[in-house]
Image (cartoon, grey):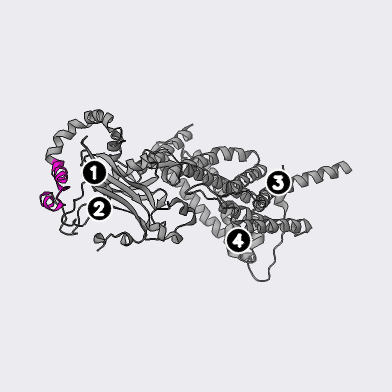
Amino acid sequence: MNQKIKWGIAGAVVLCVLVVAFVWGGDFASKDTEVLSGTSSPSASAEISPTASASASPSASPSVSPSASPSASAAAAVSAKPSAAATEAPRQSISPETGKDAYQTEPVPEGQPVPVEPQEVEVTDNELTCTISIRCDTLLANMDSLAPEKRALVPADGVLLAERTVTFHEGESAFNVLRRETKQNKIHLEFVNTPVFNSAYIEGIGNLYEFDCGELSGWMYKVNGWFPSYGCSRYALKDGDVVEWIYTCDLGRDIGADGGWQR
Amino acid sequence: MKDVFSSYHPFVNLCYFVLALGCGMFFMHPVCLALSLVGGFSYMAVCKGRKALGFGLKFMLPVLLITAIMNPAFNHRGVTILTYLWSGNPLTLESILFGLATACMLAAVLCWCACLSEVMTADKLVYLFGRIVPALSLMLSMVLRFVPRFGVQLREVSAAQRCIGRDVSNGSVFQRMRHGIRILSILVTWSLENAIDTADSMKSRGYGLKGRTAFALFRFDRRDGAALAVILLLGAVMLAGGVCGVTTYQYFPSLAGGEPSVWAALVFVAYGVLCGLPLMFNGWEAQKWKRLQSNI
């Protein structure tokens, strides 16, 4: 009897450790899961917004003005004239020793939005729109380096999700919008949270994974023609942003990324 | 029931298990997995008797379930999205099926290994490898013998310690821990000493020396030759099937493979015969025995 209890306790301890490892490890989307589930579908957001505001407003409305507003309100203003607003927007806090911020990002070039930490952002029920598209046309030219069983997954025109305008809530990141759109359009998406970069990393879309087409291949994103130097969870979208998800077979060189962050 | 296949020549046994384990580990086609699991489990039931069922329920079923659950929790590949997991990644049909397939493979290999340990006893190993690699085969047979002997000795030491009130069942938690460590220390000392004793004893008998012969009861007769021929023929068919890709099955990104053809059917029949071979030998032997009895 005693023996049985001992084994039971040992089993429970092992199970607890496994659960803790699973939650703390990379496979668990911590904050933005809850944020997203509140505003799961843009089409239904009109009905949802009262409940969403009821739950989020007590903390959202006061805190927006002091802490999150510089980036958010500036971002709203920026959409028209990026360069002017960039001077007002708070810059990243760069550590003098490493020349990088707390999440390994080098200084963002002038005129581009700085990263926003997803855990600090308050999502408001202010509805904005952006366009999103998912393409893998670089694969069409590199079909022979793709595994045979994956070839059927590449559409003839290389477009997984045609460009479309979607609604999102102010404060949501490029990652939030990608997750919602892939879910709605029944496109497969696998990501992993990387605490070092404080962002989700997109491993595969539509079962096309990183390294599927050589060791320099994977998914990249581009907003208004610029490939951000930080993760998609830290890119706070503005009204009218054009987000493109593109598969690269050559570390971005074949899709026009200048690779500023590589230097 | 007494296992007849164990009485075959050790080389036949060795060839058979190399083939059965190799095919069981590398062929992930659902049909192959099912054949291997059924064959392995039923042969284990013959070898181990009633113990096999307990082993299957107590040990293999949990391993099977855990493996089958773990895979879809961490593997999100596959085109058929069933639902979304708590982490935000998709739960796919393909990952569940792949988890089940790996669980079946693991269970089948465990069954075959259990049979292997019953059939390939230490004397057979020493007979097979004693000439080629004397040191290794002696070590292997010692290691194989070590586990059961360690258990027996553990019970002995524990019983002796209990008499003087120093077993793991006596005293407070800390005292128990100290007693446990003491018993472990006694056991380790015993096993080291025992190993040196065995090595010295074998050396003094001239084990591994040139020109020494070893007495063995094994004789390669006509029955063994026929069995070996059948095993090698089936192995050749399986190898050809594996090279042609009949036994491979695609789980990701979508399930594919296993188009029915005459060649595929032939390979699967061959694999079924291979997995059921020891049972067939047993059956033939029983029939022969019955016929001889009725002739008297």
Pointer 1 residue: A118
Give the Cα separation between the discs numbered 2 and 4: 58 Å
The amino acid beneath tag 1 is: Pro
Mark 2 in CB contact with mark 4 (< 8 angstroms)? no
Where is residue A48, by image quadrant?
A: top left
Q: Are marks 2 and 3 on the same chain?
A: no
Q: Name the residue under label 2.
A: A230
The x and y percentages for residue A173 are: 25, 44
* Residue B160 can be seen, yes or no: yes
User: Which secondary structure lies at badge 1?
Assistant: loop
Quadrant in which the C terminus of chain A appears? bottom left
Place of residue A204 in the rendered image (x, y in percent of width and height, measured from the top left)? 38, 50
Q: Are marks 2 and 4 on the same chain?
A: no
User: Reading the chain from its start, which is encountered first: label 3 or label 4?
Assistant: 4
Nearer to the camera, B7 or B192: B7
Label 4 crowd (10 A; few <14 / some 14-19 / many >=20): many
Outermost residue toward the right in this view: B296
Write the residue at 22% across / 30% down. A53
Q: Mark 3 points at which residue?
A: B279
Q: What stretch is highlighted in magenta?
A: A67-89
Callout 3, which amino acid?
Answer: Leu
Q: Nearer the viewer, residue A58 or B156?
A: A58
Label 3: element kind = helix
* Residue A114 placement, left or right of A138: left
- Residue B239's place in the image compared with B32, above or below, is below
Q: Mark 4 points at which residue?
A: B137
Is the stretch drawn in magenta largely helix, strand or loop?
helix
Looking at the picture, which amino acid does disc 2 mark?
Tyr
3D distance between C-alphas at marks 3 and 4: 29 Å
